[in-house]
Amino acid sequence: MAVVWIPTLLRPMAGGAETVRVSGATLREVIDNLDQQHPGLRDRILDGGLIRDEIALAIGSDQATDLSLAVAADDEVHILPAIAGG
Amino acid sequence: MVTPTKPDYKVIGTRPLRPDGIDKVTGRAQYGNDIKQAGMIQGQILRSPHAHANIKRIDTSKAAALEGVKAIVTGADLPIVTGDTRAENSINVLAGAKALYRGHAIAGVAAVNAHVAQQAIDLIEVEYEVLPPVLDVRDAMHAEAPVIHDSLRTTSMAGKGENPTNVAAQIGFNFGDIEKGFAECDEIVEGEFCTKMVHQGYIEPQACTAMWNPDGQLVIWTSTQGSFPVRKDTSEILNHPISKVKIIPTEIGGGFGGKIPVYLEPVAALLSKKSGRPVAMHMDRTNVFEGTGPTGGTSIKAKIGATKDGKLIAGYADMAYEGGCFPGSSVTMGAMAMFAPYDVEHVKIDGFDVVVNKPKTQDYRAPGAPAASFALEQLVDELAEKLGIDPLKLRAMNSSHEGTRGPGGMPFSRIGQEECIEAALNSAHYNTPLEGPNRGRGVASGFWFNVGLRSSVNVSVQPDGTVNLVEGNTDIGGTRASLSMQLAETLGIEYGDVKVTVVDTDSVGYNDVTAGSRTTYATGMAANKAGLNLIDEMKKLLAPKWQVELDSIQFADGVFSSGEKSGTFKEAAGIVVGANGAGLTASGSVSAGVLVGGGFGLHIVDVEVDPDTGKTQVLRYTVIQDAGTAIHPSYVEGQMQGGAVQGIGWALNEEYYYDEDGRMANSSFLDYRIPTTLDVPMIDTIIVEVPNPTHPFGVRGVGEVGIVPPLGAIANAVSHATGVRQTQLPMSPRRILETTQGIE
Amino acid sequence: MAGRVHVTTRLNGEETDFLCEPRQSLLEVLRDVIGLTGAKEGCNNGNCGACNVILNGKLVNSCCVLGAEVQDAEITTIEGVAQGDHLHPLQNSFLENAALQCGICTPGFIVAAKALLDSEPDADEARVRHWLAGNLCRCTGYDKIVRAVLDAGEEMRKTPASTR
């Protein structure tokens, strides 16, 4: 089971949890399963099946831009604001 | 330089001359306002004198009657667009029903020359109903503040608020248990800090030339950090197909984030369409201050706590950032960068993006981070004083490292904060005692990301074995050189054998902005990939020529070989390209995400503060920064030094000085004082190299980190020089006298 | 159209003439009438030095000089600093020292530094910083620019002017 870190402002939707254990072989499956446990979360992360422009996902310390990437047991999944620069 | 094991690069790490250098030292290089097109006329913009007003009526008839006037446009000439961001971009380019800040563009005129255009501008009559302006970020958050946009609701990841407000967005980060954390602390320090709106200060004002051809093909020459975003924004604002818009980037005279949005381009395009002539527009310096995108002022309340041995346990910040007239401050990025140098278990941040009647704010080099660092680095300094621990040693004790939960909770991969601290402890500067009255030394850490995003380049081999590199990133600080060097290293050829060209949006694949510390990183990755693809293509053509199996051909150190056959890149090019006569081309495209690296910096500064005038003289300054791998060390040093000096200006002098009507009283270079040669000493640099695991050559973006530590470092130095801590920027002579002598 | 003035001047060593309106600055004349765009407009009110030219031996902000004022004057712009394809020591030094990033302020700095070194070839760091305080740069922090000017000064002291 992966460990999904819930963004602070979404924690009320996850019963206040900072992290949630979720099964899934790929990033997409993990997000779908997260949504099963806490309905509504997927729509905050994805829009029409793609990662929202304002969101960046990471598996451990590596950004993941491809939802079909494999997620291993005990991997951390992070949901972060996408940043830019000047 | 401090380097762990580094490969034996042939080109990377050397200091060749940049390929565009001669054009730039002879005045031949063409910047935004240097384009001449046959029949070209000049455009000018009418701007709102009021910070907040309903626009009741615009009468352009007298302007239209002036001889020499060829076209006039207002917001009514822009198509209606849907989507919040697009609508905001459109309204910012030409106002709709309201003037939202002094300097807001109201109308555009094109005439036979700039003087007639200005005369026409002065003849346009506008009836305003002036409204009270909202000018302070905390005041704007109050329930009783005038609401700038009736339709604005507070947005957060959790959803939308219900009531009209000036608080456009709320963000938050919360790790561990902040109350438990502070309860465990032996020493807690806190403070309230405030910074003012400041401008990127690029010396070249915005400038462009647009030609709307009768067949609908729109060509725009413009000084920009991103020709592809300009193409997209222009297409959306004008509701004109992207396929009919071509953006030709000129050379650019500085950007720092401020030349990413469009301001003049859609107006010039419309004026060209109406007049049938090419229209050139550029801003004067007052327009730049009042009508582009400075970075917003901030109000930060912060608190940190540690054990008596110096272990940081908890950190809290409440950060309110100005977004200007529309949402879009950099509070989220500031929040993410703030605690990055420190391994702290309990961190809570509340952040607010707030609208005020000032120009729509825009990224300015490490957006959000300098103000956050100004607050936190001073609290760390205070803690060090209270605990009797050297400020660098305190940072070392609490340093982030690989695995530390960094921005937003994601663990860091390999980073160089510890190495930067070590370099500082060993530096000549830090080991030279500072003597004399009214003098103080300050240090500060800082962090910034490098984004990756998308880049695409083409490479072609010429019969003589030289290689053309075609790319789409405008060269603000030496990237033609750094990209050529990475390609030369990949191919095992000499730097001088790569010829690089920056091209328009029709001529190369998609490239994201020259910003975000990404060009040497991501476009370099694309160049490397293109080079590797080129090697593969050459192998395929060599195999039949050498009469060997394709997969027997190796390429290493610039040499192809198979069994006893071998040839350098040049020799192989002669065989596969020269013999065939035809060119050989390959491309490389990357889409590299946004959280792909990031680097740390640490600044040491000595100041002397004159107790009678309050003036701060910077005596000595050292910038230490982790570049991952310094491709061209001179240009890495340049980024470090440039960022530091912008920080010096921001810390000591720069601010948008507003009167109560929302008018910037100092909108010229005379009174908005950026540093001159007399304000700064030589800026010493120490490049640390802890390679970035996500890049083939270990590159970390270096463009932005340099502006993050100066505000805190100088504030700490001033505090030690005067005994008074400065919580407001700028630390101008007046401010220093007010706080040290109680002078009103 | 306001009545135009016919002006004859010596520009980068060549006799040049042009027509201009009385309200046009020398900067505008150079860029828009004559077509030499090396001098840049950074502020248009004498505060940034990007428009520096040398007028009758003096360093000026060409945005603060009228085109109509330069009758019979000698003007040197950035385009006149190199001799044919032979770069001036300042130009070489700026390149070698990486003293430019975006390059917009570079023409102004090179003209200003030339005016200094032509009259004070021994200028030291303090004098160089004082002289160049009227030229704003936002990219470099001035470190490499000052080094480049000092290096060029050293080079120029070694080499007689006639052979540069």
Image: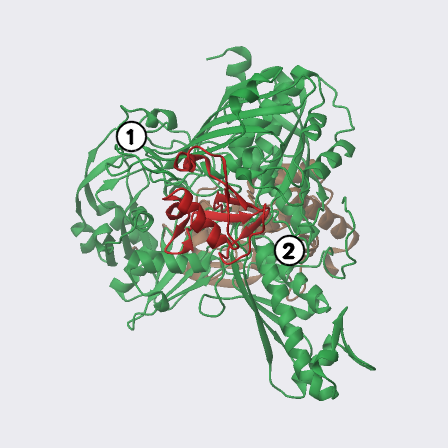
Q: In the rendered view, does A48 fall on the left or right side of B596?
A: left
Spatial CA span between label 2 and label 1: 48 Å
Q: Amino acid at mark 2?
A: His
> How packed is label 1: few (under 14 Cα within 10 Å), some, or many (20 or more)?
many
Q: Chain of mark 1?
A: B
Q: Which chain is brown?
A: C
Quadrant where the image shows the N terminus of chain B: top right
Q: Classify mark 1: helix, strand or loop.
A: loop
**Residues flagged by tags 2 and 1 on a common chain:** yes
Residue B611 rendering spot, x and y as whole percentages: 60, 16
The answer to whether residue B42 is seen in the rendering is: no
| Count of marks overlaid on the render | 2
Residue to which mark 1 is pinned: B133
Q: Earlier in the sequence, mark 2 or mark 1?
A: 1
Residue to which mark 2 is pinned: B695
Residue B544 rendering spot, x and y as whole percentages: 70, 88
**Residue C55 vertical position relative to residue B461 in the rendered view, above or below:** above
Q: Which chain is red?
A: A
